[in-house]
Image (tube, rainbow, N blue to C red):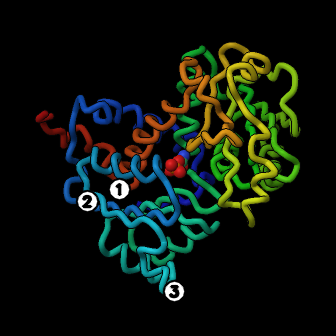
Amino acid sequence: GSNILSVEQFDLDSIQTVFQTADRMQPYARRQKRTKVLDGAILGNLFFEPSTRTRVSFGTAFNLLGGEVRETTGMESSALAKGESLYDTARVLSSYSDIIAMRHPKSGSVAEFAEGSRVPVINGGDGANEHPTQALLDLYTIKKELQHHGHDINGMHICMIGDLKFGRTVHSLSRLLAMYKNIRFTLISPKELAMPDAIIDELVRGNHQITITDQVAGLLDADIVYQTRIQQERFTTPQEADLYRGKFRLNSEIYTKHYKPNTVIMHPLPRDSRAEANELDNDLNQNPNLAIFRQADNGVLIRMALFALTLGVADLIEKYECDVNW
Ligand code: CP
């Protein structure tokens, strides 16, 4: 097995393998079937930054394949707080685990950790850099949602909105989408929070159509609208984040005004539900195009697929099926 540190490691063929494997995980995720293919295997789940979905879905995915999970959450509860290096931490923890999932606030930290690890390491988000498993579950969701409307990823129009500078989910997703054909990207953010040039360059090299703006205006004609949170934790001071919070909201009224009736609404979550932010209003909760919880559900399927493929057991899942006892 190898590490999963960046979406750059994937191509259209390997993405298809991940998605086909994820499809096969449905009955296990729905508890219609059980498998013990990872019986005796241990996941080291190391989260040095807050997380709900990524941490719990990595753990759940591993459990659903029959494996066990060891968790470390928070820098303060690990020896990193005493000055231990990521390399030493990795050397030690990788002898306790068969695979490691890790999130850390510093860009590049998961790759640094992987240098010291003797088992595969999966990036669960490294600062503002990348969140490859989120991008894969987002892309899987986009594919399913568009299929539902008889559309394809190639040629689609996606609006990404909010903090495109520090948003690792939009960085990784853009890099994956760059591998497809003729995508229209409308990138809407405050000028100071624009998509990094390196990613724009990748989109340009892929001959995609790019519109960069700081306004939500007119009928956007998007297939997907991808809202993001202003992440206070990425700014030097909370006051700096205050300048941007609440700038790009989406609610029922704005949705009706700027989007066509079938536009799929996505957000990596967590959405900031405080009144001053509220970038994705609860008044859209009953809208059938709101895909945010389907994204979160798909996260389990994608992470099961990645574990099975990385540990080389994808072909053995059905062989190790066992009874459902409850
Ligand atoms: N989407 C996502 O990464 O959520 P968490 O921060 O809750 O893991």
Disc 1 versus disc 2: distance between alpha carbons?
10 Å
Looking at the image, the residue that sits furthest to the front is: 275
Q: Nearer the viewer, residue 272 or 88?
A: 272
Q: Secondary structure at mark 2?
A: loop
In the picture of the structure, the residue carrying the numbered disc 3 is 83
Residue at 53% x, 34% y: name it: 140
Residue 65 image offset from top left, x and y in percent: 27, 46
In the picture of the structure, the residue carrying the numbered disc 2 is 41
Of labels 1 and 3, earlier in sequence is 3
Tag 1: Cα neighbours inside 10 Å, few (<14), some, or many (≥20)? some
Of labels 3 and 2, earlier in sequence is 2
Residue type marked 1: Leu
In the picture of the structure, the residue carrying the numbered disc 1 is 311
Name the side, left or right, on which 317 lies relative to 243.
left
Q: Secondary structure at mark 1?
A: loop
Residue 59 image offset from top left, x and y in percent: 35, 52
Residue type marked 2: Ala
